[in-house]
Amino acid sequence: MFDPARHVHLPSKPWNAGEARTAIAEIVSDTIAHFDQHSFWPAHPQDDGLADGNSSVYFGAAGVIWALDYLKRVGASERSIDVEPLLPGLLERTRTEMSAMGEYGLHGSLLFGDLGTALVAMRIAPSASLAEIVHRRAVGNAELAVRELMWGTPGSMLSCIAMAEITAEDRWRRLFSTQAARLLDELTETEHGPLWTQDLYGQRRQYLGPVHGYAGNMIPLMRGWEWLAESQRARVADAVPRTLAANAVHSEMGCTWRPAVDGRNLLCQHCHGAPGMVTTFADAPFASDELERLLIAGGELTWAAGPLTKGSNLCHGTGGNGYAFLKLYRRTRDPIWLERARTFAMAAISQCRSKRNEIGRGRYSLWTGDVGLAIYLWNCVTGQPAFPTVDVF
């Protein structure tokens, strides 16, 4: 059901809200201390050979800047950095990075492209010109073959939701509705339930998780629920339990889902496996007995697997897995899930501190680094989950 080598023993350290707040302050202080106006932040050895100064929302400066601003905005931290004068240069750097990525440089990617970076800038220093950049890139994504959140249309739809909150302009709802209609038109009945086929990295596969697959496509449809027609809502509410049930892998520990319908590996992390599926669909604005059983079983499997060896981060670390428990707590109000989320938080704090001590500095990215963990810790303090750049922007 999961690879034990990818997980570590769960320490029995009791929850301490004061320590969680201290850990947030440590992360923010370390992040600010290592900021450079020209090169932003150094890359981390675990980030796949990434060069220093990456600008993206996923790996780089845009995500870190958004996180520091968000932590201050919600009262989790009193500190931030004055980045407003640097935002034009950050946007230009993103475009330079994307230009070296072949056909993917054409994408208005939420997590890697200038759409996401412009959205961060729009949140901090809104302007009509930035709004036009976001709109133009989101419109351009309407015809992309990539049907997943990181690079494709679902990320544009999340951008529309965020921009509607910032600007109150109706054009974002209209664009969202156009893209939602196309996305649902391409949802196809298969022997494994209703699915999308992803055209990604030179392959055509039916991915299931929240970053590259089915769950990620459903995220904006559920977040924009009030913008959907009744027939669209009915289709989503019908499809989700059937697809989850058709692809669930069960054991006495609970259940999980493969990265793709044709996959063999059973990962247990946010991007692939039970944690991300639970985190996504515990927010479903509909319910069924089968869906509730699957969500609970996915949470049990995530608990049985324990913290991840890859560290404390969101995408494939302990903090990201902990969001499954926070979401189940909000859905069920059963305090066991909040207790488990906070237990994972204490484990993640230890992992973060250990790695920072080992290399002498933190890991400066949102989805794979320390500021993402800081947001998770704050959510554990408040008991209110909001997965960064997906549930909130």
Image (cartoon, grey):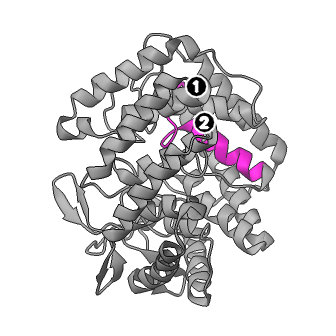
Residue located at (77% from left, 56% from top)? 383
Circles 1 and 2, Cβ within 8 Å, touching? The answer is yes
The residue identified by callout 1 is 126
Which amino acid, mark 1?
Pro
The one nearer the camera, 189 or 4, is 189
What percent of the width, then of the height, locates residue 369? Answer: 52, 38
Residue 197 falls in image quadrant: bottom left
**SS at circle 1:** loop
What percent of the width, then of the height, locates residue 141? Answer: 32, 46
Bounds of the magenta segment: 360-381
Quadrant for the N terminus in the image: bottom left
What percent of the width, then of the height, locates residue 206? Answer: 28, 69
Instruction: Categorize mark 1 by other alpha carbons within 10 Å: few (<14), some (14-19), many (20+).
Output: some
First reached walking from the N terminus: tag 1 or tag 2 = 1
Residue located at (50% from left, 45% from top)? 172
347 to 90, vertically: above or below: below
179 to 192, vertically: above or below: above
Instruction: Categorize mark 2 by other alpha carbons within 10 Å: few (<14), some (14-19), many (20+).
Output: some
Q: Residue 373 in magenta?
A: yes
Q: Can residue 281 be seen here?
A: yes
Label disc, if present, on residue 167 of the rendered structure: 2
Label disc, if present, on residue 254 of the rendered structure: none
